[in-house]
């Protein structure tokens, strides 16, 4: 297996170099997708299936779709993607600095025991059997709560770009799909299977690899396929029901945190008695919000057909 | 019992080996073929058969029917999305090479 691991490492480095070295943005994105998939395989080899799922779904999948949507937007607006050449140097310096800092941290910090004995001791109080879910939603709940709020803030930032005239239009560009075509058929066949996979990932998250982020990303992808194939109509920003769905995750999370405070174990610290049920409720609510937020992020602000091209 | 296991192992070696050959042929076609349509031809045929044979080979090592069902699901999903994407890429390429 050492040969496999060495080959994998070499491939990851080569693909990473190809991503940053090329001049064409589209090429760079394609290499970025390949890079994400190889890194996901590497996480599986490190026995971190949770991280692998997240990397494959969010890193290689959703982030790449966001990049591709960005390129499409630039092309429609007739903007040269490589205009900001003077920006390349500061970006390269910042990335080199980050890499150096990470490398320093790797050598400076002591390696943690594996598996960490404190975690094994605390697991009976977690309310779930999957250690990763226990850390994410109970022991380090702060991080996860803030992550979901950051996602929401990013979406609000995207929505800020909406033109006044389009504010009450459906989100994203109008989709043109040939009725009875391949894409419209795909949009009917895939969503039921994808929905099942997404829900299963969330359900499995309490005892096995999976969880709200992984399941939510799959569900977001299902929603995107359905929207792009014209199976469902993208909603409007002004619809109250969708707004509630966007904030229900952080809201339930906060309520559970407050419940922890009132039951005497402290804010965002779940007492053993309610931990299991509370985590399940948080997982379900978070999945809804994460799926909606990610799908809305990819669809972008509401646009009409002519607003993109004539913008500049 | 060990005879059965050996038969299963041989089936796995042969089928995954065949699958890898299809992947190899598809990759060569992707690199060598001159235009988008013949590249797509190489990609989809080889990918679908390659992944199908690999999945079939691994299915001989499965411990339960559940694992086999999961392998079939993975193959079917890849087949569905590869076929759809090939159609979409071909249509886009057709529009670009043949503007009205």
Image (cartoon, coloured by chain):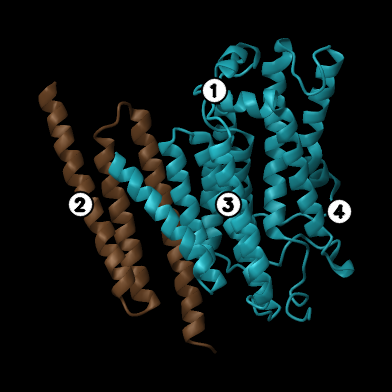
Chain colours: A cyan, B brown
Judging from the image, what secondary structure is the residue with disc 1 in?
Answer: loop
Q: Mark 4 lies on which chain?
A: A
> Dot 1 surroundings within 10 Å: few (below 14), some, or many (20 or more)?
some
Tell me which residue sits at (61%, 47%) in the image.
A101
**Closer to the camera: disc 4 or disc 3?**
3
Q: Is residue A286 left or right of residue A63?
A: right
Q: Nearer the viewer, mark 3 or mark 2?
A: 3
Q: Which chain carries label 2?
A: B
Of label 1 and label 4, which has the lower sequence position? Answer: 1
Q: Name the residue under label 1.
A: A207
- Which residue is painted at 65% across and 80% down in the image? A80
Dot 2 lies on which element? helix
Q: Position of residue A73 (x, y in %)?
A: 68, 71
- Examine the rendered structure and indicate whether residue A133 appears above or below residue B80: above
Which residue matches tag 4? A238
Residue at horizontal 44 percent and vertical 55 percent from the top: A13
- Asked whether disc 3 touches disc 1, contact meaning CB atoms under 8 Å apart, the reply is no
Q: How crowded is mark 2: few (under 14 residues within 10 Å), some or many (20 or more)?
A: some
Q: Which residue lies furthest to the right in this view?
A: A164
In this figure, which residue is indicated by the disc labeled 2?
B18
Q: How far apart are marks 3 and 2 (CA)?
A: 42 Å
- Quick check: A35 left or right of A168? left
Mark 3 highlights which residue?
A99
Q: Do labels 1 and 4 share a chain?
A: yes
Residue A295 tag number: none
Q: Distance between the residues labelled 2 and 4?
A: 55 Å
């Amino acid at each position: 297996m050492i040969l496999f691991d060495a080959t994998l490492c070499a491939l990851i480095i080569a693909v990473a170099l190809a991503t940053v070295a090329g001049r064409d943005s589209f090429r760079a994105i394609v290499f970025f997708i390949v890079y994400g998939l190889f890194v996901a395989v590497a996480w599986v080899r490190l026995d971190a299936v949770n991280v692998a799922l997240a990397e494959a779904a969010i890193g290689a999948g959703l982030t790449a779709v966001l990049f591709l949507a960005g390129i499409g937007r630039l092309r429609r607006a007739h903007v040269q993607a490589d205009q900001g050449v003077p920006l390349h140097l500061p970006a390269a310096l910042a990335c080199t600095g980050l890499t150096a800092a990470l490398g320093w941290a790797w050598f400076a910090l002591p390696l943690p025991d594996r598996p960490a004995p404190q975690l094994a001791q605390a697991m009976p109080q977690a309310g779930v059997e999957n250690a990763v879910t226990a850390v994410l939603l109970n022991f380090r709940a702060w991080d996860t709560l803030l992550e979901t709020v950051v996602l929401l803030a990013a979406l609000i930032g995207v929505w800020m770009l909406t033109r006044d005239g389009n504010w009450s239009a459906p989100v994203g560009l109008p989709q043109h799909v040939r009725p009875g075509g391949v894409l419209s058929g795909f949009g009917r066949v895939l969503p039921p299977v994808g929905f099942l996979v997404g829900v299963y990932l969330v359900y499995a998250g309490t005892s096995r690899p999976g969880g709200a982020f992984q399941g939510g990303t799959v569900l977001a992808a299902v929603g995107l396929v359905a929207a792009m194939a014209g199976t469902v109509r993208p909603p409007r920003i002004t619809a109250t029901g969708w707004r509630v769905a966007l904030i229900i995750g952080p809201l339930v999370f906060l309520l559970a945190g407050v419940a922890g405070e009132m039951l005497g174990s402290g804010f965002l610290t779940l007492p053993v008695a309610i931990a299991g049920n509370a985590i399940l409720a948080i997982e379900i609510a978070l999945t809804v919000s994460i799926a909606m937020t990610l799908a809305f992020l990819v669809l972008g602000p509401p646009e009409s057909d002519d607003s993109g091209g004539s913008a500049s | 019992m060990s005879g059965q296991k050996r038969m299963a192992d041989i089936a796995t070696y042969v089928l995954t080996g065949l699958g890898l050959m299809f992947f190899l042929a598809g990759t060569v076609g992707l690199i060598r073929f001159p235009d988008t349509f013949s590249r797509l031809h190489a990609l989809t045929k080889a990918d679908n058969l390659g992944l199908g044979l690999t999945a079939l080979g691994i299915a001989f090592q499965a411990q339960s029917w559940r694992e086999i069902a999961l392998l079939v699901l993975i193959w079917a999903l890849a087949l569905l999305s590869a076929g759809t994407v090939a159609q979409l890429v071909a249509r886009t390429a057709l529009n670009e090479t043949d503007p009205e």
